[in-house]
Image (spheres, rainbow, N blue to C red):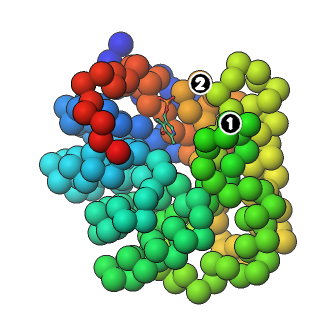
Amino acid sequence: MDCVENYKNIKKTLPENVLLLAVSKTKPEEEIMKLYDFGCRDFGENKVQELSKKYEVLPKDIRWHQIGHLQTNKIKYIIPFVYMIHSIDSIKLAEEVNKQAAKHGRVVNCLLQIKVAEEETKFGFSINEVADLFKNNAFAALKNIKLCGLMAMATNTDDETEILKEFSAVKNLYNSLRVNCQVGEEFKEISMGMSGDYPLAVKEGSTIVRLGSTIFGERDYSQKNGEV
Ligand SMILES: *Cc1c(COP(=O)(O)O)cnc(C)c1O
């Protein structure tokens, strides 16, 4: 099935308020254009170099979402145009994004990545850490980033109970920040759910699902030359 059919079929199963973010990493521009022509405007990428290249050649009204870990020295390449950064995983990165955004006279939408998965490798703030940061007003001075909510990845497992537990922890953190901390009205997104687990994420209150392989098919990394 082609990506437009897949996109349509998935969209039908999602509540109105949930954004279907098409994760187009490793996929060619022609595939992105098929979805674009259908009306999709939100695309996610995880490599700065690939994102910048696609931005250059594709229509300028696409909203580009950076979803993967971002190195501070690469922020400058995407800051002029990126719509939302889902992967703010340290205060240092938040400060650096803020600084670069100020240089470009922009206020950039950002999500705080929360580490809930069992895996060692996942980036992000712990739940306690992020609550403390808000209590200490750690983000208050960062006027060029707009904190729009939270992002998380669940453990890659077939154990649905574990996945639900992790998504539910993110939702609880979100609720508690809304009630107990000075988050703004714009703090309203929960980006969680990938191809393998998005129905569970939606059940737990996700507002953005990030889907790659269920839309575009499996990714083939064999042609890649080790870009990071
Ligand atoms: C690749 C990626 C996705 C999409 O993964 P699929 O399993 O193909 O849907 C979602 N989120 C992040 C952060 C990713 O890197």
Of helix, strand and loop, which one carries label 2?
loop
Where is 175 relative to 144, above or below?
above
Mark 2 residue's CB less than 8 Å from ligand 1: yes
Q: Amino acid at mark 1?
A: Glu
| Residue 53 image point, x, y percent | 21, 49
What is the total number of numbered labels drawn onto the structure image? 2
> In front: mark 1 or mark 2?
1
Q: Residue at x 73, y 65 (%)?
A: 130
Q: Is residue 197 above or below residue 105?
A: above
User: Going 22% across and 56% down the picture, which residue do you hit?
Assistant: 60
Residue count near mark 1 (Cα–Cα under 10 Å), binned few <14, some 14–19, many ≥20: few
11 to the left or right of 5? right
Q: CA distance from mark 1 to mark 2?
A: 16 Å
Q: Residue visible at 73% across and 73% down? A: 133
Position of 202 relative to 185 (above/below): above
In terms of image quadrants, where is residue 175?
bottom right
Q: Is residue 111 visible?
A: no
Residue 197 percent location from the top left of the image: 64, 28
| Helix, strand or loop for disc 1 | loop
Left/right of residue 177 with respect to residue 123 in the rendered view: right
Residue pointed to by mark 2: 196
Q: Earlier in the sequence, mark 1 or mark 2?
A: 1
Q: Position of residue 172 (x, y in %)?
A: 82, 52
Name the quadrant of the N terminus: top left
- Residue labelled with disc 1: 119
Work out which residue is located at the far bottom of the displayed protein and give it.
141
